[in-house]
Image (cartoon, helix red, strand yellow):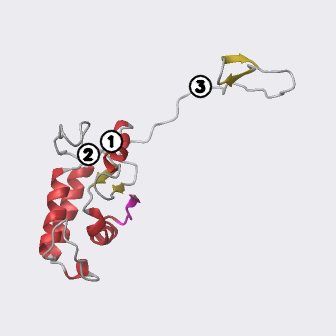
Amino acid sequence: RFRQYLDWNHGFSTMPKHYNFEYQLAELPTKPKRIMNTMDQKKSLTIVTGMHRSGTSALAGSLHTMGINVGNRLMDTDSDENLKGFFEDMDIVAFNDQLLALNGVTWDTLVPLPVDWYKTLDPAIVAEASALLKSEWERAQALCLKDPRFCLTADFWIATTRKCFDITPQFLI
């Protein structure tokens, strides 16, 4: 047991008598619990997206620092724009550019994509996306991908991950 609290102005000090909080250190189990193997875990996909220069690299970088796989082949850092990195997987960026090109647009086109555009794509494209995600998941079951193009291609990735992996990606915007 200990009776201390954090006083932001003076560091740790003794708790005043009118506080009656008691803290006990948790007893450690005599036998450690089995840590789940990554193969036992269900795959997860978190997608970080947002407008350029909106903090998405900082968010993806934070997740990377916490140990989450952010891709196998990351974009190089830019000494002028982004010193710590973009945390964008080059294969995912190229695939998103390919999806946009199939619809006659680029990342900076102001014309919206047609409604349900992803439903009419060749099944080979879905298979290619599935294979790409499988290769990304080889390093870890929890995967975070970041690309501003996901703002435009999110419907495709939601449909593909549901169909091929029975998961729905989580989005951080």
Q: Is residue 18 above or below residue 173?
A: above
Residue 68 seen in the figure: no
Secondary structure beneath disc 3?
loop
Residue 148 position, x and y percent, is 27, 58
Q: Residue at x 24, y 62 (%)?
A: 149
Quarter of the image for the C terminus: give it: bottom left
Closer to the chain start, of discs 1 and 2, is 1
CA distance for labels 1 and 2: 6 Å
Secondary structure beneath disc 2?
loop
Instruction: Give the labeled residue for mark 1.
Output: 61
The residue segment tinted magenta is 166-171
Res 87 label: 2
Q: Is residue 99 above or below residue 73?
A: below
Q: Residue at x 12, y 71 (%)?
A: 101
Amino acid carrying mark 2 in the image: Phe
Q: Are marks 3 and 1 in contact (CB under 8 Å)?
A: no
Reply yes or no: does residue 54 show up in magenta. no
Q: Quadrant of residue 15?
A: top right
Q: Residue at x 20, y 82 (%)?
A: 120
Secondary structure beneath disc 1?
helix
